[in-house]
Amino acid sequence: MISEPFFLDTPAGRLFAVHHRPAETGRTRGHVLCALPFNEEMNRCRSMITLQARALSEIGFGTLVLDLIGTGDSELGFVDARWALWLDNLASGKAWLDAQAGGCRAIWGIRLGALLAANLHASTEDAKLALMLWQPVIDGKSHLTQFFRVRIAANMDRADVQKETTASMRATLAGGKSVEVAGYEIHPALAAAIDSARIDQQVPPSGTRLLWLENSSPEKRELNPGSRKLLEQWLGPGVCVDAQAFTGPAFWQVHERVYAPEAIEQTTFWLRAWADAA
């Protein structure tokens, strides 16, 4: 695998990008666009993303990983981040991949990035574009609430700080003020967009192939009930979903560098089978 870092110029600003591609250019079958998770989950997932990109390169696929505007090494600050800008960033990444040999063949989203990936995929209306979702966030509001609790926990033992709740933080945002959590300053517009985002609002076009990959215990090896119910109600006719469970650590949750090889193996096998049948 060859990894090439560069800056991608977009209307919103320059995005730091890494293009992982097969060492032998003639073997390239296409490319995958990766939509990263939210905040600290993004940092915790980077090692797994690189390992997955390496595995995909071995079957002939490149992977483009973008730091969205206001995140990582891209331009602007997190307070400047907006959901619409992030979607535009990903669309610019897809356009760049479409100009490469083989074009963009799949969009891969992780956690909140899965919501962005599903949103972008639905907007393309391209059933030939595969969609791969790792541990998808179903409801943006619940996800943001969990993030707000990081601030509550950090201030719990501080007598000099007024006690807060997730409701009081949302009231601050509703009043037009940003809220800082763990060093991330969240603008009211971004918070409102995440609060209103649900994955079942983004319906893939008929004919789409979808991989839904979710962590489970070794004893059960099955999706949680909420995911099963969502998949039954969300997808329209003609969408072929392959829902799979993998075992291993919840790598997006822990600070230590941990790996879930099953997730990589299952994703690689699925994409190769999809490409062979396409």
Image (cartoon, grey):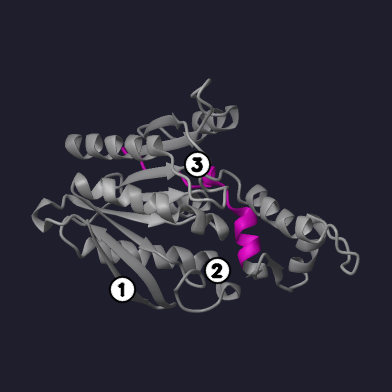
Marks 2 and 1, the one that precedes in the sequence: 1
Image position of 203 with respect to 170: above or below: above
- Indicate the secondary structure of the residue bearing disc 1: strand
Marks 2 and 3, the one that precedes in the sequence: 2
Quadrant containing the C terminus in the rendered view: top left
Residue count near mark 2 (Cα–Cα under 10 Å), binned few <14, some 14–19, many ≥20: many
Residue at x-position 53% and y-position 51% = 256
Question: Where does label 2 land, which residue?
Answer: 82
Q: Is residue 93 visible?
A: yes
Residue at x-position 34% and y-position 47% = 52
Q: Is residue 209 visible?
A: no
Image position of 238 (left or right of 251): left
User: 148 or 276: nearer the eye?
Assistant: 148
Give the number of the disc on residue 6: 1
Question: Where does label 3 land, which residue?
Answer: 135
Label 2 or label 1, whichever lies nearer to me, is 1
- Indicate the secondary structure of the residue bearing disc 3: loop
Q: Residue 231, how many percent across, how many down?
A: 50, 32
Task: Give the Cα separation between the discs numbered 2 and 1.
Answer: 22 Å
User: 74 or 195: nearer the eye?
Assistant: 74
Segment tinted magenta in the rendering: 190-207
Marks 1 and 3, the one that precedes in the sequence: 1
Residue extending farthest left: 26
Task: Give the Cα separation between the discs numbered 2 and 3.
Answer: 22 Å
Q: Residue 257, how many percent across, how many down?
A: 48, 50
Quadrant containing the N terminus in the rendered view: bottom left
